[in-house]
Image (cartoon, rainbow, N blue to C red):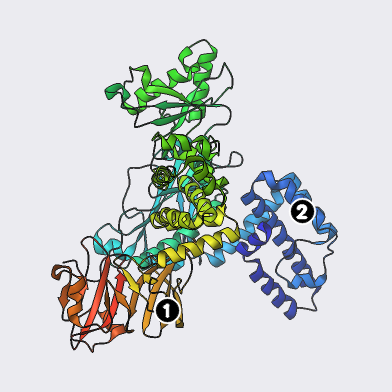
């Protein structure tokens, strides 16, 4: 696949058309046929070399073995007319395998020929001395080449402002915005960081920065290790037309990054290579809890976990370091010593050499290292040894849940006695629940067990580790298993907790259903949630008349597509992509319109409901009711009278109305609108403005 992708990058399918044309016009000339064969051979050799440059030398042998396996595919004359092929006959294949195995340098004769050919090509295709050809303009920066597509040249400004940061190789601006707003319109910057600088990026918040390329250890023209970053602004840069700005940033930025890697023979890089790791260094780890307020007031409510590892040598002779730390909310902070531009591996190697020479001994003691870290990095002076405590694990949710016995009877007596039981001990027990477990609890503990269990489960439903999504996914999973195993009154009680989890973070709950449950279990859970979400209740619900008056549509998230559990039939459906919001679906039925967003996580957010159907109601007021009924359910201060509704409401309802009443809670984007004609309610609209309310709050 990499081989064929390289052919596409080189435009070899276009060169094949040129060969076809030459052979068609000069079919009688054997020299043209010979030229076609040589052209095809050179095309394959160039493709091999470029592919290996992108993949790295580590794939050279496997790539060669793939070609060897293709030898049985004999080349045919007709292949001169095709774009690409992995096979090229035994003779051609032998030459390619030899080239791959030798990694040859150009011979003098070949080099002279190449220089002559390049001179001819330059004379024919280059348009000036500024490094610009018909496709890109080349910019030299610190021994590297950055290509900017010429098709966007009139929309861009390159380096209009000098920067004192020597790490920045290039700054690219949107020309129109820069000229109109005096310096705004920054699209992106390309930067080069040393290894030590990159480590400091890893331990920062990294907003707007990512690194996409790395200097190879071999064959790179740059001295030392280097990382190449793509920096984007985190503030508004294009007040007028953000859509055009975003499209330009994406089109130019994507090309520049991909071309930069290939043109400068770098290795593609992704920051997830680091952030996807559990630990920075391999080997043994020690975990120490630090209580930052213990020395001050004896409190252990706040606890931070320090991860210590041995970066150079393992065992009794290896020094220790703090490689990262984790707060009680699940945020993990990597740490690298900022040692005057020295990479951590060199810094720790020097410290290990000192320890090998007998100094300093404290680096061999994890607790001493932890205390020094707290003093140096946090600026604390933990004089009280009670501020530190050994821990069995890093506090990662998977490790915490693994400590539970999984037997509810180990924890139920403690709950009844009003003793604290950790969510990490309690929730895994739910995985083993069956429909008979509930009756077993009644037999064992009488009627005293449910209230303390329900309270504990409700407290455990939502994680405090907001940044560690794995914790909430596990909580969704365990309580979902309890719901699947419940029956009767127990189902109703557990449903309240599960609905709370769905409303807290519907995307995470949907991920939990996809990742943790079987297909049948996920389907059952979605049907449960669908009923719960569609059950009447809440301000922004629209009651749907029918066999079950308890069901409603709401400005809410749903686990399945329309009709969201209610008995409605769509007449038309339109789906399109909206800037900033993603995929939008608009459904019209008999007398109603409904709009919702949906994403790849399987969550559907209804943001607009409008209807003129008799009997539909919200907050107790139905279409067809007299205007006076509004005041049976609303305070006069809660509704604002408008002589004219928004153009979006009028676009659907029409302009045949007298006035409207609107309710918008303070600091909310949602609104309710009652349309009135001849002192009767003729339409209801519910809308979530997303970016802001449709009507200003009162």
Q: Is residue 341 visible?
A: no
Q: Is residue 297 above or below residue 639?
A: above
CA distance for labels 1 and 2 = 52 Å
In the rendered view of the protein, which quadrant contains the C terminus?
A: bottom left
User: Measured from the top left, where is residue 632 in percent x and y?
Assistant: 19, 73
Total numbered labels placed on residues in the image: 2
User: Measured from the top left, where is residue 397 in percent x and y?
Assistant: 49, 40
Q: Nearer the viewer, residue 580 or 402?
A: 402
Tag of residue 587: 1
SS at circle 1: strand
What residue is shown at x 39% (from left), y 57% (from top)? 503
Q: Nearer the viewer, residue 627 or 477?
A: 627
Q: Residues within 10 Å of mark 2 (few under 14, many from 20)?
A: few
SS at circle 2: helix
User: Measured from the top left, where is residue 399 in percent x and y?
Assistant: 53, 36
Q: From this viewpoint, which residue is outermost toward the top?
A: 358
- The answer to whether 501 appears left or right of 611 in the picture is right
Q: Is residue 45 visible?
A: yes
Q: From this viewpoint, which residue is outermost toward the left?
A: 637
What residue is shown at x 75% (from left), y 69% (from top)? 36
Q: Residues within 10 Å of mark 1 (few under 14, many from 20)?
A: some
Image-quadrant location for residue 675: bottom left
Q: Nearer the viewer, mark 1 or mark 2?
A: 1
């Amino acid at each position: 696949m990499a081989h064929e992708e390289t052919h596409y990058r080189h435009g070899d399918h276009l060169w094949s058309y040129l060969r076809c044309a030459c052979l068609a016009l000069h079919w009688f000339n054997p020299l043209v046929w010979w030229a076609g064969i040589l052209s095809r051979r050179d095309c394959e050799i160039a493709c091999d070399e470029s592919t290996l440059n992108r993949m790295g030398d580590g794939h050279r042998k496997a790539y060669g073995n793939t070609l060897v396996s293709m030898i049985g595919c004999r080349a045919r004359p007709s292949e001169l007319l095709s774009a690409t092929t992995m096979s090229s006959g035994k003779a051609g294949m032998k030459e390619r395998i030899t080239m791959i195995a030798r990694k040859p340098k150009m011979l003098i004769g070949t080099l002279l020929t190449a220089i002559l050919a390049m001179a001819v090509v330059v004379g024919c295709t280059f348009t000036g001395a500024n490094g610009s050809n018909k496709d890109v303009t080349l910019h030299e920066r610190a021994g590297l080449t950055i290509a900017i597509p010429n098709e966007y040249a009139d929309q861009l400004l390159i380096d209009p402002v000098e920067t004192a940061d020597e790490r920045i190789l290039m700054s690219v601006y949107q020309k129109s915005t820069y000229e109109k707003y005096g310096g705004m319109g920054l699209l992106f910057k390309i930067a080069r960081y040393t290894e030590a600088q990159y480590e400091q990026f890893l331990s920062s918040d990294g907003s707007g920065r990512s690194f996409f390329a790395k200097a190879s250890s071999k064959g790179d023209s740059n001295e030392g290790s280097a990382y190449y970053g793509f920096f984007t602004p985190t503030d508004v840069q294009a007040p007028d037309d953000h859509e055009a700005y975003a499209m330009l940033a994406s089109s130019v930025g994507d090309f520049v990054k991909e071309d930069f890697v290939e043109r400068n023979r770098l290795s593609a890089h992704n920051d997830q290579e680091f952030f996807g790791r559990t630990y920075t260094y391999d080997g043994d780890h020690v975990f120490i809890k630090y209580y930052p307020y213990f020395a001050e007031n004896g409190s252990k409510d706040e606890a931070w976990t320090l991860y210590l590892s041995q970066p150079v040598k393992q065992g009794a002779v290896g020094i220790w370091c703090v490689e990262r730390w984790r707060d009680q909310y699940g945020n993990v902070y990597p740490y690298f010593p900022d040692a005057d531009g020295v990479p951590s591996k060199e810094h720790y190697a020097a410290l290990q050499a000192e320890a090998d020479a007998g100094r300093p001994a404290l680096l061999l003691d994890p607790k001493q290292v932890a205390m020094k870290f707290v003093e140096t990095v946090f600026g604390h002076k933990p004089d009280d040894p009670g501020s530190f405590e050994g821990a069995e694990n890093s506090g990662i949710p998977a490790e915490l849940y693994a400590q539970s016995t999984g037997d509810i009877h180990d924890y139920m007596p403690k709950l009844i006695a009003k003793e604290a039981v950790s969510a990490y001990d309690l929730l895994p027990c739910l995985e083993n629940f069956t429909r008979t477990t509930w009756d077993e609890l009644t037999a064992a503990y009488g009627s005293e067990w449910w209230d303390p269990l329900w309270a504990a489960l409700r407290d455990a439903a939502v994680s405090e580790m907001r940044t560690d999504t794995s914790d909430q996914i596990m909580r969704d999973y365990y309580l979902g298993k309890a719901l699947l195993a419940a029956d009767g009154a127990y189902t109703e009680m557990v449903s309240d907790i599960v609905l709370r989890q769905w409303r807290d973070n519907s995307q995470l709950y949907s991920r939990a259903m996809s990742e943790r449950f079987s297909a049948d279990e996920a389907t059952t859970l979605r049907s449960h949630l669908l009923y719960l979400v569609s059950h009447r209740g809440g301000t922004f619900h629209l009651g749907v008349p029918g066999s079950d008056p308890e069901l409603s549509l709401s400005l809410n998230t749903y686990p399945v597509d329309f009709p969201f559990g209610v008995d409605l039939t769509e007449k038309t459906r339109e789906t399109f992509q909206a800037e900033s919001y993603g995929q939008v679906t608009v459904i019209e039925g008999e007398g109603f319109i409904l709009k919702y967003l949906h994403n790849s996580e399987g969550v559907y957010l209804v943001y607009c409901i409008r209807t003129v159907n008799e009997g539909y109601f919200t907050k107790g007021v139905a279409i067809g009711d007299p205007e006076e009924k509004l005041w049976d359910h609303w305070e006069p201060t809660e509704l604002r009278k408008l002589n004219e509704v928004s153009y979006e409401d009028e676009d659907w309802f029409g302009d045949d109305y007298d006035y409207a009443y609107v309710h918008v809670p303070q600091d909310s984007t949602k609104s309710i609108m009652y349309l009135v004609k001849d002192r009767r309610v003729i339409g209801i609209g519910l809308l979530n403005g997303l970016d802001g309310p449709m009507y200003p709050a009162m």
